[in-house]
Image (tube, rainbow, N blue to C red):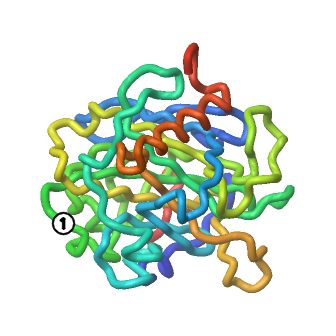
Amino acid sequence: MAVAAALVPLPRALALPTVDLTTTTTGTIANQAPNVGGTAIYSIIDTLPAGTGVFDPFLTIQNKGTEMGFNTSQGGNGQGYMDTKRVPQWTHDLHVGELAIVPGPDGTGRYYAFELDANETGNGNIDRLLSIDNIRIYTSSTDTATTVGNTIKKLDQLGTLRYAQNDPTLSGNNLTVANWVKIDSSRYDAPPGNGGSTSGSGSSDMIVFIPVSAFGDAKAGDFVYFFNLDGANFASDDPTTLGLDASAGFEEWRAVVGVPDGGNTLVLLGSALASLGLLAGRRKVACQV
């Protein structure tokens, strides 16, 4: 809202993406959180179906151009802090103990996984493209969301920084977005150029694997705050804006969680990765705020 309105539209494709998921299936970005270490893995994925009712998101954000927000049940009903939506049903609190430990795309390692359904347009339209420009993950033993609210300069007050896609410091009012990921929301299989059937809500588009080791001494009851900034290089679309394709909409994130659905979440995750051939064997561009 106030923060989102202050974002200055940026030229698209100011630099080459760190990970280009329009031409590859997976890539990595080293953890920029000070004194933490580890590397996150970003991969395409196509979980079907992935509509809100079965996708079970914990974070929903939406704005034309750049969009950002973090998950919390605070901030009011419906519109939440920054560009978050659908509070508290589909933007809400998350705890470490709810996260499932899963292997990485090659079938090894121990990771927490977070999956994105990017509700962008498709069918050859450039608006099917979206840049994932920052992810920052914090943990806290207490609910700290209201201390941050809409103020981006207070973001690090959310708690202990466990993962940062970019340098977590601010330069003036600018967030660094040097490491960014390019996705095509219509891409549904491994060979490039075969997209077109999965734009809009209903199938997922990207999954990011964060090493469990990055969470250090976090306790099961600790809050997990997942901050996401999109659209600094390839803008997000808003169907309420005149002239945009009405199939565009909010971006929603879900966590791969443990057993409340009887294990079906992990089964779906494994099936989606295997279908992409990702399981082996068994299977300072700045954002003004």
Q: Nearer the viewer, residue 211 or 31?
A: 211
Residue at position x 64%, y 71% in the image = 249
Q: Is residue 138 left or right of residue 232?
A: left
Residue that label 1 marks: 143
Question: Residue 2: x percent and y percent?
Answer: 42, 83
Question: Residue 189: x percent and y percent?
Answer: 75, 38
Quadrant of the image occupied by residue 36? top left
Q: Is residue 117 left or right of residue 248?
A: left
Question: Residue 6: x percent and y percent?
Answer: 48, 79
Residue at position x 27%, y 52% in the image = 138
Quadrant of the image occupied by residue 33? top left
Question: Residue 224: x percent and y percent?
Answer: 28, 54
Residue at position x 17%, y 52% in the image = 221
Q: Nearer the viewer, residue 47 or 78?
A: 47
Please name the amino acid that badge 1 sits on. Answer: Asp
**Against 161, is 43 above or below?**
above
Q: Nearer the viewer, residue 24 or 197?
A: 197
Given the current orientation, which residue lies at the most extreme top position?
281
Q: Nearer the viewer, residue 148 or 153?
A: 148
**Against 12, is 83 above or below?**
below
**Is label 1 in a helix, a strand or a loop?**
loop
- The local crowd at label 1, few if under 14, some if 14 to 19, many if 20 or more residues have their Cα within 10 Å, is some
State the quadrant of the C terminus. bottom left
Q: Is residue 240 left or right of residue 95?
A: right
Residue at position x 53%, y 43% in the image = 207
